[in-house]
Amino acid sequence: MKLDISIYKNRRDDLLDKIGDAVAIIFNSHHVPRNRDSEFKFRSDSYFHYFSGFPEAESVIFLCGGKEKKSIIFCKDKNIEYEIWNGELHGPAKAAKDYLFDEAYSLERLDEFATKLISKFSKVFMVLDDNDSNKNRVHSWIGNNKKLKRSGSRSPEMIIDLSSIADQMRSVKSEDEINIMKLSGDIASKAHIRAMKKTKPGKYEYQIEAELLYEFMQNGALDPAYQSIVASGKNACILHYIKNDQKLLDKDLLLIDAGCELDGYASDITRTFPISGKFSSSQKDVYELVLSAQLKAIDKVKPGNLFTDPHDAAIDELIRGLIDLDLCQGSFDEVRDKQLYKEFFMHRTSHWLGLDVHDAGEYTNPDSTPIKLTKNNVLTIEPGLYIRPNENVPKDFWNIGIRIEDDVCVTDNSPNILSQMAPKSVKDIESIIGTDG
Ligand code: GLY
Ligand code: MN
Ligand code: MN
């Protein structure tokens, strides 16, 4: 399933309306070396992909606003030598036709054309991130025009960050995007189910990672959305654990944080379950608490609520439970005000989700208040508890690390849980663990 190419053109037209009499320049990423002469698999820059759908590295698009609105793509020329080794290139003519650009030129001519194109505008929009080479390139085009000043050339006076306009567009998903993200969620959910079924004590974490990748790829999601976390026992208390090289032990939990990428769109799901197939009583107590916090947080995913409301709801529930389990001591207000819960829950409950797993979009307004949720935002809800060995904590709880994460779309009615298919009740998960191990 792929978005229709006309969607990318419509986004460019939308952006042209928003920037007015200015030019927007969007660069694709380059191939990244892995070691010696091998490269990581290429993945387009998310902004470039959002506004073009064009899959070739190094390409650049120019959206020229004002009276003579037009979109231009610069890409590699056809080159049989290159194509024999690396695969077919579109070349400018086919790129323009297939991807609905008004004009297309060879990348070889980028500097020459860009210098002329930007001289017509006083404002340049580009994504201002830490990519210095793109900034240097734009500065060099501005510099070229300055040198030509005496021959009547003008040059832009302002470079403006494109992110604020583009992020606003990216953070409210269209129905087509939500359909793809649902499919991405379904595939990742199937992968979690497969992982649960294949889990058996004595296997290795990487064998379970292989089952996840198998299910992603069998369903047409050719890449994980991020490095999968398959963390058994104490490894679950390492938030970014990706070594995935330990043996699964009977008494431990397995935390899997894994999602796939479909037509660029990420899913991001975490499930935690007992390797033996049966929770111990302390594991179950902590699991039920995290699940209850997650359900309370999901209930807050409503248009008009603050982005922070789900986090606050999760924290309230976790604090109540941590006091009940005697893992935190003191009154509710004390534990909240002194943030004593942070020993066990140290990350945020949510982030935006889309082309990037931590997707584009603001979290606060200019006055620092939290942003409000609007219809068709997609965010994760992922509370957790991570209990490291500590003499103030009963030993039964040591090394329990639990996170439950779903992908949730804001609607006018109940939240649309895109990762709904992945089981999470104690009963449902205990009934499938190891059944195909
Ligand atoms: N898998 C990355 C995250 O949950 O934020
Ligand atoms: Mn996440
Ligand atoms: Mn995750």
Image (cartoon, rainbow, N blue to C red):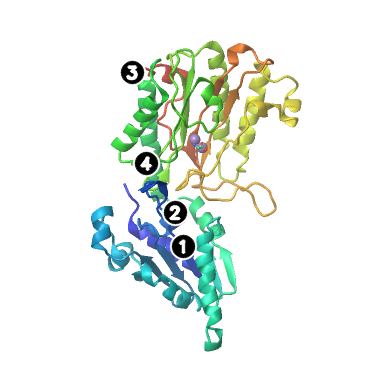
**Camera-nearest residue between 217 and 227:** 227
Q: CA distance from mark 3 to mark 1?
A: 48 Å
**Camera-nearest residue between 241 and 371:** 241
Amino acid tagged 1 = Ile
Q: Is residue 91 above or below residue 277?
A: below
Instruction: Say if mark 4 contacts mark 1, CB within 8 Å.
Output: no
Which residue is under mark 4?
Answer: 223
Which residue is under mark 1?
Answer: 26
Amino acid tagged 2 = Asp
Q: Residue at x 62, y 29 (%)?
A: 345
Q: Which dot marks residue 45? A: 2
**Is ligand 1 less than 8 Å from the beta carbon at label 1?**
no
Earlier residue among tags 2 and 1: 1
Q: Is residue 291 visible?
A: no
Q: CA distance from mark 4 to mark 3?
A: 24 Å
Q: CA distance from mark 2 to mark 1?
A: 9 Å
SS category of the residue bearing label 1: strand
Q: Is residue 192 visible?
A: yes
Amino acid tagged 4 = Asp
Which residue is under mark 3?
Answer: 437
SS category of the residue bearing label 2: loop
Answer left or right for 15 relative to 193. Answer: right
Earlier residue among tags 3 and 1: 1
Q: Which residue occupies the extreme bottom position in the image?
A: 151
Earlier residue among tags 2 and 3: 2
Residue 103 x/y as whole percent:
35, 72
The C terminus appears in which quarter of the rendering? top left
Q: CA distance from mark 2 to mark 4?
A: 15 Å
Answer left or right for 85 relative to 329. Answer: left
Q: Which residue occupies the extreme front position in the image?
A: 36
